Each structure stands twice: as C-alpha cells, then as structure tokens.
Image (tube, helix red, strand yellow):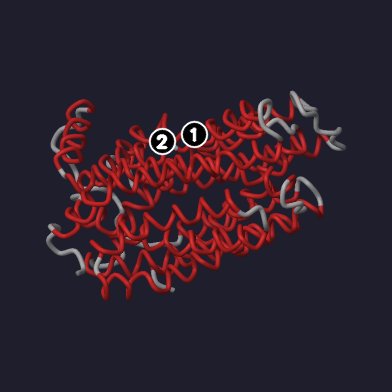
C-alpha cells in the first residue's frame, strides 16, 4: 500500500466520521431544543475554531512534523467523541424538546464543549493534511490526486456517513459518537504507518510577527489567491446558512424522519462523487478559467430550488447539482493554491486563506438562526424556515457577479495552470 493510498484511506475514515456527525450533531440538537438559534449553536461550535485558530494552525504546521500533528489531532477528536458518548449515555432518557430553551442544560453544554474540541482539532489537522498531500504527487498531477481524494471523501462523508449516522441515531443515540471515536483511531493508525519526511523546510529565524507578515504579504500580493479566498469565504457563509436551516426544514416542512433526512443528504454525495470523477477531464477540456466561475454560478440554482420548491425531490436535485459544482470548484481552487504557494510558507498562507474561506462559516450558521427566529413572528413558521434559503440565493447571485471576472482573468494569467 503506497503512502498516498494510506493517506487517502485515513481521509476516508475521518470523513466517514464527519458524515455520521453531520446527522448526529444536528439531530441531537433538535432533541434538546426546537429553537433555531440554539440548534445553530452546535454547528457554530464546530466552525468557530476556524475563525479563532486558523492563523496559529498555519504557524504550527510550518514548524512541526506534519504527520505528527495529524496524529495528535485525530487522537484529540477520538477523545472528544468518547466524552460526548459518555455524556449522552448518562443523560438518557431525554425529555421533550422545548420551543424555547433546552431540555437538558448540562448535556447541551457538554455537547458544545465536545464540538469545540472536535472543531479545534479539525483546524490543525486539515491544514496539515493539505500541506502534506503535495509530498506524495508531482505538482502537475495535483488535480487528479485531489479529485481522487475528494471522491473518497465524499463517498464516506456524504454518501455512507449520513445514512450510517441516521441508522445509528435510530439504533441508540450515543452509538454514532462512539463509532466516530473508533474511526479517528483507525485514521491515526493509518497515518502512523506512512513513511517519509514530512518536516517543513527549515527557516533561519523564527519570528512570529515576521513569519505572519511574510505570509500575509504573499497572499495579498497574489490577486488570484486573495480573490479565491474571499469568494470562498462568502460562499461558505451562504452555504452554511442553508445547511443549518435544512435540518429543521426537513423535519417540519418536508416531514422527514432521521433516516429519510440521512438519505436526502446522500443526493449531495452522489453529486460530489460524480464531480470527483469528472473534475479533471472537465478542467482539461474547458479550462479552469471557464469552469471556476461557472461552478460558482450554479449555486444560484441550488439555493433557489431549496427556497422555491418545498419538496424532497427538489431538495435532493439541488443537493446533487451542488455536489458536482462544489467538487469541481474545490479541485480548481485547492490545486492551484497548492501549486502557487512555496512549501516553506504553505502552512501559513494556507491558514490565512482558510481563515477567510472557513472563518465565515460560523457567521452563516448564526445568521441562519437569527433570520429564522426574527421572521417567525411576522411570518409563518414554514416561511420563516425557508427564508435563509432565499437570503443565500440573493447573496450568491451578488457574489457571482462581483467575483466572476477576477477569477476568470486570474486563472487565465496563471502560468502552469491546466488550460
């Protein structure tokens, strides 16, 4: 088994756990409260560390052995899920979820704490993983390597994970969290078995201020990287608005149970798998300058369908199309980022990029809950639950109009980018 295969297999196990958690975290929150803002706090806890720790993660990634960092972070996530398992088991049976407040304050607090630890470890782990991948493949093969890895990610995260998560939630509420702890343990073992030197290039001096200034200057001076960063950030903000709104929307408007909700999410997985299979040939056929802005504009259709047609089939189609476009976009943006940034500062520049790209996620999650809660008085509950989809649709349309030319021209001018 090659190092790349072991690495991708570890990615598969961690993403299987993430896919299971997608259902488990959200469904558990709705069993404790029906307040949209309080439900949103759990995913906010998972994403807030991206805003708070993205920069420190970059500094650490450029200073320590990247394999060792991944091992430590997978171990931390396994511990967090074990603690969550114990907390839920001790709290059973759960009381009825109130429309205001939570039914079990101590369990809600424990879940928030576990989610924060999982999110914190994910920041360091993912940053190290993105800087580690170029060690396995030549730069001219990054599109293919990333596309294959994301195919595995999405089979595990969006296809198998949500269905398994829904089944495990229905079987025994703590079981998905215990299963996730085992997944992260297996992933750590696979990464441990990888041979090679994953120590970043040595620097003559170590000055935090100077290192951050160097990375910031590099990111700011590259128009393509900076445009991709803020575009991805706002897209993630609007996307997360729909993600947190979808769980209550699926229950109350579409009338889905946990298993049906998990199956709905697999539509996005099939799209993402298809996206992973076609991304590289599409890029070679049409060119990144054409495909990247086109994939961005597809989100207008995705979010608009969720808002306009309250039917499970329409939602499934929107998630499927969104899965295809998201993977093609990621293949272009991440591969070119890995190609452009020098290895010695890859961790720091990557972390600054992801601060902008992922740091907006908590804002989107919080906005979704605030919008729904504020609208529920003047509007019906059903209309209020759909409102985040409408806001996201308008927002992504404006974003596409603003970013289209900069992305197209930046990719056209990038030497070495696949045409």
Tag of residue 407? none
Q: Which residue was labeled with disc 1? A: 362
Q: Could you say which is closer to the camera, residue 232 or residue 95? A: 232
Q: What residue lies at 54% left-to-right and 45% top-to-bottom?
A: 75
Crowding at dot 2, Cα within 10 Å, few <14 / some 14-19 / many 20+, comes out as many
Q: Could you say which is closer to the camera, residue 242 or residue 88? A: 242
Q: What residue lies at 55% left-to-right and 44% top-to-bottom?
A: 389
Residue 314 position, x and y percent, is 61, 60
In the image, residue 87 sits, relative to residue 232, either above or below, namely above
Q: Image quarter for residue 32?
A: top right
Residue 192 position, x and y percent, is 46, 57
Q: What residue lies at 20% left-to-right and 31% top-to-bottom?
A: 206
Q: Image quarter for residue 6?
A: bottom left
Q: Which residue was labeled with disc 2? A: 359
Q: Could you say which is closer to the camera, residue 264 or residue 333? A: 264
Q: What residue lies at 78% left-to-right and 46% top-to-bottom?
A: 173
In the image, residue 244 sits, relative to residue 8, either above or below, namely above
Residue 353 position, x and y percent, is 30, 41
Residue 13 position, x and y percent, is 55, 59
Q: Could you say which is closer to the camera, residue 221 or residue 250? A: 250
For residue 229, side relative to residue 391 (left or right) = left
Q: Are marks 2 and 1 in contact (CB under 8 Å)?
A: yes
Q: Image quarter for residue 374?
A: top right
């Amino acid at each position: 088994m090659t190092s790349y295969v072991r690495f991708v297999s570890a990615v598969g196990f961690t993403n299987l756990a993430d896919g299971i958690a997608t259902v488990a975290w959200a469904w558990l929150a709705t069993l404790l409260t029906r307040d949209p803002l309080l439900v949103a706090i759990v995913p906010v806890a998972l994403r807030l560390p991206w805003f708070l720790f993205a920069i420190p993660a970059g500094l650490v990634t450029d200073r320590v052995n990247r394999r060792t960092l991944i091992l430590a972070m997978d171990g931390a996530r396994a511990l967090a899920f074990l603690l969550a398992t114990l907390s839920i088991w001790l709290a059973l049976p759960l009381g009825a979820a109130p429309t205001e407040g939570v039914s079990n304050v101590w369990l809600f607090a424990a879940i928030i704490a576990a989610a924060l630890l999982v999110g914190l470890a994910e920041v360091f782990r993912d940053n190290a993983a993105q800087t580690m991948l170029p060690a396995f493949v030549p730069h001219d093969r990054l599109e293919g390597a990333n596309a294959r890895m994301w195919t595995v990610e999405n089979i595990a995260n969006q296809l198998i994970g949500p269905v398994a998560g829904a089944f495990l939630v229905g079987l025994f509420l703590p079981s998905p969290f215990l299963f996730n702890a085992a997944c992260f343990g297996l992933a750590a073992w696979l990464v441990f078995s990888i041979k090679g030197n994953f120590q970043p290039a040595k620097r003559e001096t170590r000055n935090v201020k100077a290192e951050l200034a160097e990375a910031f200057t590099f990111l700011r001076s590259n128009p393509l990287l900076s445009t991709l960063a803020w575009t991805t950030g706002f897209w993630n903000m609007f996307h997360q608005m729909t993600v947190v709104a979808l769980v209550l929307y699926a229950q109350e408007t579409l009338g889905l149970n946990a298993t049906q909700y998990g199956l709905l999410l697999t539509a996005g997985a099939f799209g993402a798998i298809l996206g992973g299979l076609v991304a590289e040939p599409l890029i070679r056929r049409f060119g990144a300058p054409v495909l990247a802005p086109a994939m961005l504009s597809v989100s207008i259709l995705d979010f608009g369908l969720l808002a306009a047609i309250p039917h499970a089939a329409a939602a499934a189609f929107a998630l499927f199309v969104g899965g295809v476009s998201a993977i093609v976009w990621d293949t272009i943006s991440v591969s070119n980022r890995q190609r452009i940034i020098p290895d010695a500062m890859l961790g720091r520049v990557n972390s600054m990029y992801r601060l902008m790209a992922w740091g907006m996620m908590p804002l989107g999650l919080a906005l979704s809950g605030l919008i729904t809660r504020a609208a529920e008085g003047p509007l019906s509950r059903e209309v209020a639950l759909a409102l985040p989809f409408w806001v996201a649709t308008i927002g992504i349309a404006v974003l596409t109009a603003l970013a289209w030319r900069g992305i197209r021209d930046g990719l056209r001018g990038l030497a070495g980018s696949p045409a």
